[in-house]
Image (cartoon, rainbow, N blue to C red):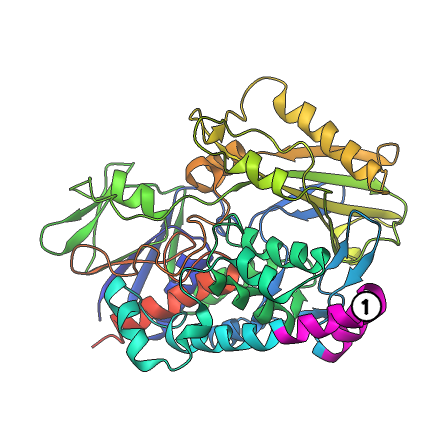
Amino acid sequence: MSDVVVVGAGVGGLAAAVRLAAAGHRVTVHERAAEAGGKLAVYERDGYRFDTGPSLLTLPQVFDDLELGLRPRPLDPVVRHVFPDGVVLDSSPDHAVFLERIAATLGDEAARDWERFWRRAARIWQASWESVLQRPVTAGSLARLTWRVGDLAAIAPGRTLRGLGRRYLRDRRLRMLLDRYATYTGTDPRRAPAALAAIPYAELTHGGWYLPGGLGTLAAALRARCDDLGVRLELGSEVTAIEADAAVRGVSLRSGRFVRADVVVSDVDATTLYRDLLPSPGRLAGLADRSLGGFVLLLGVRGDTPELAHHTVFFPRRYDGEFDAIFPGPGRRARPVDDPAVFVTRAEDPSVHPSGREAWFVLVNAPRHGTTTSAVDWRRPGLADAYARHVLDVLAQRGVDVRDRLEFRETRTPADLADSAGAPGGAIYGTAGGLLRPGNRGPVDGLFLVGGSVHPGGGLPMVTLSARIVADMIGPAT
């Protein structure tokens, strides 16, 4: 039996703890915050309950063998898309139904284009799922894929997601819909790899799901499963260093205590790990770019808003303006997006809001927090409040005006996420989308990495897959 220390109680860390405890290891999780869950956080006020992190569950089968007792509810539409010309398109997990909706709203030609794109996306997903997403990946292993994955050409190395959309989709609204999936991994569709077409395929093939009570119940289920398996969870226990020679020896805590370990699993951001926690920093070369951040409004709303689905996105007239603001070119500075895409989550779930009210989670993509030209200082006095008012004005211009129906308004900036979740700059997804991220095996024996900043990427299913990969690498206790 090995003594395993997990650093961080985000979803990746908790899922790794569950798997390793079930495999017979003694597992202790050290989390610096007062609550487990990481970015999968919950805020409650006046009878309202908000998920302040992920709001959509995809690939629920990834969680099945964790035995969490989840009862997810399927969503249809998965997302309602409101385009700048007023056209509304509801996506569906039923491919035939979605094609019918595309034909009815955008025309038969657009539906045929989507079908052609869908066949390509299916090949990309199959190649990614079988050869990349479920196993460790390095530059060498990716190179070897060209010799043993017959349809790797479908992934189109060197082509961008934007380029793939232009090849298959003539209707600019469908191209806009596809571009948005690049932001699921925190990146710019003009630079994102075409392989990210696997994301809409996975979402619309396997469906979008909601957990009654909110997605924060996933963190509670993971913690309960840890308790069942005898995992020791120490909250308010910050790890300040991972002690190692040729192999890990344990971790040092802020309290001054040293905890011996045979294996350390890090669920902190890879940048933080390599910069701050290892005895020999300076191994940052090769880490992927940081993802974009998010500006969030939590709204208590009086009355009913029937024009909203569970998830609704309102697109701007010029989508590239958003990417220009968040990913500035040479000689330019990042800035809050003047005309952003606005994503609204509103659950028809009586357990998350008082009767006759709605709990809205509103997200717009934003530059990371910081003082460099590629970031915005979100702590600048008055900025968060002014931008919150601006986002509500944008929503009103797009036909959903709730400014006179608000019971309260709370804001969460990238600076807040950086503080609460230890996410450098408040990057939502850790590292930006791509096939090659920091690996799951650390630079010393016995050190492993999970979470959204490492392979296979950000988002609940990918983070959970990183825990599976690491648990398989460590193996059962002997």
Q: Residue furthest top?
A: 381
One can see residue 365 in this view: no
Q: Does 107 lie within the magenta span?
A: yes
Q: Is residue 311 visible?
A: yes
Q: Residue 231 at what x, y percent from top left?
A: 38, 62
Left or right: residue 241 compared with residue 292: left
| Residue visible at 58% across and 49% down in the picture | 53
Image x and y of residue 323, in percent: 57, 41
Question: 63 above or below 295?
Answer: below
Judge the density around disc 1: few (<14), some (14-19), many (≥20) Cα neighbours within 10 Å.
some
- Quadrant position of the N terminus in the picture: bottom left
Q: Which quadrant is the C terminus positioned in?
A: bottom left
Q: Secondary structure at mark 1?
A: loop
Q: Nearer the viewer, residue 462 or 24?
A: 462
Q: Which residues are magenta?
A: 96-116
**Residue name at image x 60 percent, y 30 percent:** 336
Up-down relation of residue 84 to residue 77 (above or below):
above
Which amino acid does the dot numbered 1 rest on? Gly
Please tell me whether residue 439 is drawn above or below residue 329 in the rendered image.
below
Image x and y of residue 394, in percent: 77, 35
**Residue 189's x, y, as percent?**
54, 52
Q: Which residue is mark 1?
A: 107
Foreground residue among 30 and 367: 367
Is 120 in the magenta?
no
**Outermost residue, left side:** 246
Which one is in front, 285 or 247? 285
Figure quadrant of residue 289: top left
> Residue 68 or 229: which is nearer the viewer?
68
238 vs 159: above or below: above
Q: Main secondary structure of the magenta part?
A: helix
Count numbered badges in the picture: 1
